[in-house]
Amino acid sequence: MTIPILLCADDFGLSPGVSRAIAELLGRQRLSATSCMTHAPYWLETASLLKPLAGRAMIGLHLTLTTLPPHPTLGALAKQAFLGRLKQADIEAEINRQIDAFETGLSRLPDFLDGHQHAHVLPTIRDAVLKIMSTRLKGSWLRDVWEPLPDLFRNAPNPIKSLALNGLGFSLHRQAKVQGIPANQGFRGAYDLLGPHQPPEILFPRFLAGAKPNLLIMCHPAYVDQALIDGPDPVHAPREAERAYLASDLFPRHLAQAGVALSMGLR
């Protein structure tokens, strides 16, 4: 039996090269989904690349509260969140602005919501996200970054980093389940994009191992263009390496060896 999983490319809209790479991979069915940075300067310029893919891929909102101006760094945002200095009404307003921009680009609501640098799991932010998911985005699904501990320790390239994310994500996982908000089941793909790491042809078979239905794996493929190099996001070479791997003949062989297939929706 082939197991359906989700493979989502984050950061559509960050640069033309990021968007073009993701759109090409979606068109070749090498991805299930992409999540869009509608706050990014290249969102409206590149959103048209997704329109021919309607019904063939899931398109979501990559809630962006860090990295891109005027938003702070993740560290600064997390400090404000844990000190109780964020106002839920302000976060809700920002989420709605980014949903508005999504609608401007694609004339519809997003299929799902997740967070750049997983900021959607932080205190106050997660409360705002849950409220939006239960109202304006009712019927859409939510990225759940929680992974059962046995699977986490077996499959994570950096168990300490993944365990920290798991702990932060547990409250959102629990509350979404209580409220009946649809979500993926299991989450992988996290590794140190800025530090030493194995190449994707080594990492991805590990992410695929022991997959269960509705597992979500995130990725960040791109053509590294000047807009990305000149922009505020420092991750470059790993994006190109992921794009080349996902476009290669090796990737579908790894899917088959793991007994999985990319699904275009939750099963």
Image (cartoon, rainbow, N blue to C red):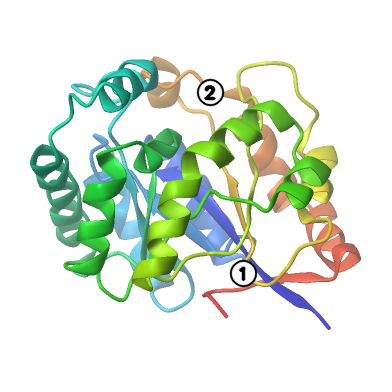
The relative height of residue 200 versus residue 247 in the rendered view (above or below) is above
- Asked if residue 247 lies left or right of residue 41, the reply is right
Q: Nearer the viewer, mark 1 or mark 2?
A: 1
The relative height of residue 211 versus residue 164 in the rendered view (above or below) is below
User: What quarter of the picture does the N terminus occupy?
Assistant: bottom right
Which residue position is annotated with label 1?
214
Residue at the image position 48 percent from the left and 37 percent from the top:
168
Check disc 1: other Cα within 10 Å, few if <14, some if 14-19, many if 20+.
many
> Which residue, as the protein is rendered here, is positioned at the far right?
257
Residue at the image position 53 percent from the left and 23 percent from the top:
235
User: Mark 1: which secondary structure?
Assistant: loop
The relative height of residue 157 versus residue 120 in the rendered view (above or below) is above
User: What quarter of the picture does the C terminus occupy?
Assistant: bottom right
State the CA–CA distance, disc 1 to disc 2: 27 Å
Residue 25 in which image quadrant: bottom right
Residue at the image position 45 percent from the left and 58 percent from the top:
174
User: Mark 2: which secondary structure?
Assistant: loop
Amino acid on which disc 2 is placed: Val
